[in-house]
Image (cartoon, rainbow, N blue to C red):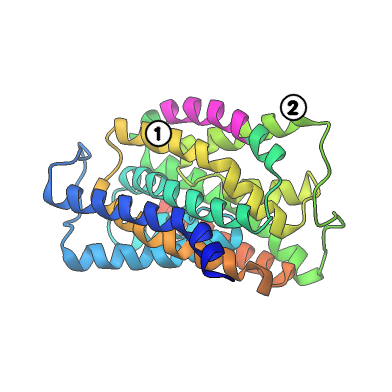
Amino acid sequence: MSKNSYFKKYFFISFFLLIITSALIWSVKGTPPQPAGAAIPSLNSLTLTMLVLLGLGAGFFGGLLGLGGGLIMLPILSFGMGFPTTIAVGTTLFAVIFTTISGGYAHLVRGNTHTRSSLFLSLGGITGIILGSYIFPVLASHMKILSLMLGLFFIFPGIYMIRDALFHRQSTAAKKAPVFSRESSLAFFGFTVGFLTGVLGLGGGFLLVPGLTYLFGFPVQLAVGTALAAVIPVTIVGGGIKLFQSFVLLPAALSLGLGTIIGAQLGALSINYFKASTLKLIFGLYFMYVALRYIIDYWQ
């Protein structure tokens, strides 16, 4: 890659990192909006560093698998770092904004995105996430129900992905998806995923990628890039609403975001080195693990 093309490809990401770093410094030294009505963990320098590293790992797998990283960040914030579930959900969704922008851009410049499909998914998704976000405060007072919903929604794509990985069932779709005459179906699918994103705070990729693969015939790599591009505006709207509703711990979200921006670039760069069956197995195993954790949390 020439110096000129390298500069063009990574100038946006470098500028994005600078903005997020500046915002993080302001949020630590200033007086950003704070979540209300919850016991918030102390955010010292060690905790913030751990959050950056968590974001780096989540961004890598998010960029690799099209998940936005929320599937990794949310359980660790909840179970590993003691964040209340509502704050973990809001903080995760806000951090996923940065993963999707970084990962979506990385896949776009590498030709792994079907832009027309992303557009219709986004249009439906924005409508859905607005509705789901205003239902979320109702669930905020019923934490065990929220945990059960999270657990149940993780099970189904996990089963499908593990089955396909073990039995080597592959999509027969071409490398480039066809121009769909079923835009309304994509928009409705986006609305459904957006609604669940507003309620569960997971960025939507955990349903979009399997849905694009099984319902619309996308190959995995193209489904990943298309999903990440589609959820950029959806997560911006949803994360903004969660911030307005005081469910976001801003310094934590920005620390996660700083790591996810870099990690998503590395994940997108690595995607062509993984077989489709390997990606599906990674998807499935992690889905099942998280499902069990949330279901166990519901019964405790």
- Residue at image point 58% right, 33% down: 125
Crowd around label 2: few <14 · some 14–19 · many ≥20 (10 Å): few
Q: Judge whether residue 290 can be spotted in this image.
A: no
Q: Residue furthest bottom?
A: 273
Badge 1 crowding class, 10 Å Cα cut-off, few under 14, some 14 to 19, many 20 or more, is: some
Q: Which residue is mark 2?
A: 184
Residue shown at 81% from the left, 69% from the top: 168
Which percent across, then down, holds residue 263? 46, 65
The amino acid on which the numbered mark 1 sits, given as a three-letter code, is Leu
State which quadrant residue 45 falls in.
bottom left
Residue 169: % across, % down? 83, 64
Amino acid on which disc 2 is placed: Ser
- Please state if 281 lies on the left or on the right of 254 as rendered: right
Quarter of the image where one finds residue 143: top left
Q: Which mark is residue 178?
A: none
Classified by dominant secondary structure, the portion drawn in magenta counts as helix
Q: Is residue 293 left or right of residue 210?
A: left
Marked residue nearer the N-terminal end (2 or 1): 1
Q: Position of residue 213 (x, y in %)?
A: 75, 51
Task: Name the residue rendered at 42%, 50% in the picture.
Answer: 98
Left or right, 215 with respect to 83, comes to right
Residue 287 visible in the displayed image: yes
- Whole-number angstrom distance, CA of label 2 to CA of label 1: 30 Å
Instruction: Pick the residue in front: 287 or 252.
Output: 252
- In this view, the mark in front (2 or 1): 2
Looking at the image, is 231 positioned above or below residue 182? below
- Judge whether 132 appears above or below 63 on screen: above
Q: Is 45 placed left or right of 247 in the picture?
A: left
What is the quadrant of the N terminus in the image? bottom right
- SS at circle 1: helix
Residue 139 image label: 1
Please report the bounds of the magenta region as a residue range. 122-135
